[in-house]
């Protein structure tokens, strides 16, 4: 089957849905969602969206905080661009029906680690869910948006694959997971909004959909990728055998939560003068250090000294989930561990969200805009989604009409049904385990080289499997995960210093000059088309 749209949006989180809504006023939009519209990393965001909304705050302060957290690797122009557009982005969400938490002064603003002021607007402790719910309703009711749920993109359709010379992107191939058919989707413009790659690690706060799809597809198509070594490990993921990937929001520390050892002793003041309000990389490394030094399974986040009514009002979802597991946060500390949380690097883009392939744009966690540098400041991610998805839309709408070539359908004439799918699950498990062991919070060159060796072996197995058997959802994700893992390790080996989220025992010092780690793919892969 062949479908045609003016714009194809791959990914249905905040970046993808906000772009689709903006485009739909004048364009026909196809929106791919791996599962359903309400399942994404965006919907899991608890803390909120950072923006300068208070009179006592300033753009310059927000920029300074972002640069400090990012180890001064941030692009100053991109950082200013995002932060200066913060208020307008929040106003647009309010127009879309998002009901942010209010107080007697107007909208309630909280403070999170790394911020010098209260500037995080939120909806209790479930901001992402509330934002996603409002946008999903608007997407579903718009006649110009065709939602393709339970579809997973396989590869981009580029001029190279069509034998053309213009190096342009003309859409993508996607697998319909319901009927197993591969759909050819043509579009004048394509936006990658697929999120990050948290599932490349064994322990992560990311949803199961975060398998680096957009980054891997763009890399295979010839996009530049940068700074993939900077994987943010959230300091406080709930530690419980029945809790899968449940995040304890940054805002808990922002509102006074204290990190403690099992005997009740605080440890953060001994690691950083900002204590619990230090940026995430500092806190995650401190927890990792204490756990390894003392042989602990976890540490504890204690906010029980706050009034129970305050906790019910500000953290209703965290409170409810903990209670389900027998943890009363009004009385008990919360057991927490670090977990892979956010991909700070990604597909290189400019201030109009353009990649180096004409017709291909990127927004959200799959991108490397220069905003985050070596470490994302808390609650800047949703803001980046909003600002760069709008930038992509504005650029698309300003472009002249594109003549679409004839697109070939997916070719399965030389493949068969797989004989044993156990290969996929074994490779998936092996990849995530050695990435956790060798490419985690603290790294060494030897560990990275071990990971790279195993990646090379897996690449061969996966390529052989992909070349001989029909594609399925798990195979597509595994193929993308191994590409993403390779990019992370390549970038980590190239960075011979410790900066932000990348800490190497072999290179513990920080170089005077901050430089991006940019990868260019000389050997673009071809699809089966």
Image (cartoon, rainbow, N blue to C red):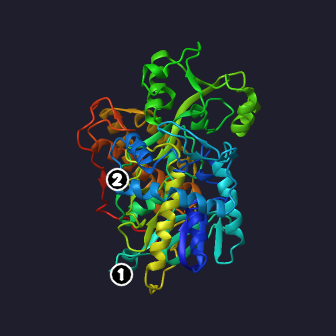
- Between 153 and 360, the one lying in front of the other is 360
The residue to which callout 2 is attached is 75
Secondary structure of the residue carrying numbered label 1 = loop
**Residue 426, placed above or below residue 184:** above
Q: Position of residue 115 (x, y in %)?
A: 48, 39
Q: In the structure shown, which secondary structural element does the residue marked by tag 2 occupy?
A: loop
Residue annotated with mark 1: 164
Q: Residue at x 41, y 48 (%)?
A: 60
> Residue at horizontal 73%, vertical 37%?
313
- Judging depth in this view, the residue of 25 and 298 nearest the camera is 25
Q: Nearer the viewer, residue 200 or 18?
A: 18
Work out how far the residue at label 2 is from the one at label 1, CA to CA, in angstroms.
Answer: 34 Å
Which mark sits nearer the N-terminus, 2 or 1? 2
Residue extending farthest top: 263
How far from the left and from the top, in percent, is residue 279?
Answer: 46, 35
- Between residues 89 and 467, which one lies in front from this camera angle? 89
């Amino acid at each position: 089957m062949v479908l045609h749209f003016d714009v194809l949006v791959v990914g249905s989180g905040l970046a993808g849905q906000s772009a689709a809504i903006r485009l739909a006023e004048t364009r026909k939009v196809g929106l791919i969602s791996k599962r359903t519209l309400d399942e994404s990393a965006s919907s899991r965001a608890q803390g909120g969206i950072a923006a300068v909304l208070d009179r006592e705050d300033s753009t310059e302060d927000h920029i300074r905080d972002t640069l400090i957290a990012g180890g001064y690797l941030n692009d100053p122009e991109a950082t200013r661009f995002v932060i200066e557009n913060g208020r307008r982005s929040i106003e647009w969400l309010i127009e879309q029906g998002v009901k942010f938490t209010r107080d007697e002064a107007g909208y309630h603003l909280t403070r999170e680690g790394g911020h010098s002021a209260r500037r995080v607007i939120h909806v209790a402790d479930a901001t992402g869910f509330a934002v996603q719910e409002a946008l999903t309703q608007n997407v579903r009711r718009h006649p110009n948006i065709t939602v393709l749920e339970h579809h997973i993109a396989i590869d981009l359709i580029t001029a190279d694959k069509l034998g053309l010379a213009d190096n342009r992107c003309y859409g993508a191939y996607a697998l319909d997971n319901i009927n197993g058919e591969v759909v050819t989707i043509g579009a004048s413009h394509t936006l990658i909004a697929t999120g990050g790659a948290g599932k490349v690690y064994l322990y992560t706060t990311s949803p199961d959909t975060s398998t680096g799809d957009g980054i891997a597809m763009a890399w295979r198509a010839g996009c530049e990728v940068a700074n993939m070594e900077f994987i943010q490990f959230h300091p406080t993921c709930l530690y419980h055998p029945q809790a899968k990937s449940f995040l304890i929001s940054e805002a808990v520390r922002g509102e006074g939560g204290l990190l403690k050892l099992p005997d009740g002793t605080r440890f953060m003041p001994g690691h950083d003068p900002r204590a619990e309000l230090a940026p995430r990389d500092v806190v995650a490394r401190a927890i990792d250090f204490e756990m390894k030094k003392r042989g602990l399974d976890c540490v504890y986040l204690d906010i029980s000294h706050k009034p129970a009514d305050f906790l019910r009002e500000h953290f209703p979802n965290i409170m409810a989930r903990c209670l389900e597991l027998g943890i009363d946060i009004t009385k008990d500390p919360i057991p927490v561990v670090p977990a892979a949380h956010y991909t700070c690097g990604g597909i290189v883009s400019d201030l109009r969200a353009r990649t180096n392939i004409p017709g291909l744009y990127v927004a959200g966690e799959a991108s490397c805009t220069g905003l985050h540098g070596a470490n994302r400041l808390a609650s800047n991610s949703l803001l980046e989604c909003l600002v760069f998805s709008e930038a992509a839309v504005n650029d698309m709408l300003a472009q002249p009409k594109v003549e679409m070539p004839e697109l070939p359908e997916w070719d399965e004439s030389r493949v068969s049904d797989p004989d044993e799918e156990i290969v996929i699950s074994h490779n998936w498990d092996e990849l995530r385990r050695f990435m956790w062991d060798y490419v985690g919070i603290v790294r060494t060159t030897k560990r990275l080289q071990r990971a790279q060796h195993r990646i090379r072996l897996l690449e061969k197995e996966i390529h052989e499997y992909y070349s001989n058997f029909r594609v399925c959802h798990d195979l597509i994700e595994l193929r993308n995960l191994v590409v993403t893992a390779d990019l992370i390790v390549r970038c980590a080996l190239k960075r011979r210093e410790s900066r932000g989220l990348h800490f190497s025992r072999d290179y513990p010092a920080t170089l005077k000059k901050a430089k991006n780690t940019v990868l260019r793919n000389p050997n673009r892969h071809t699809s089966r088309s």
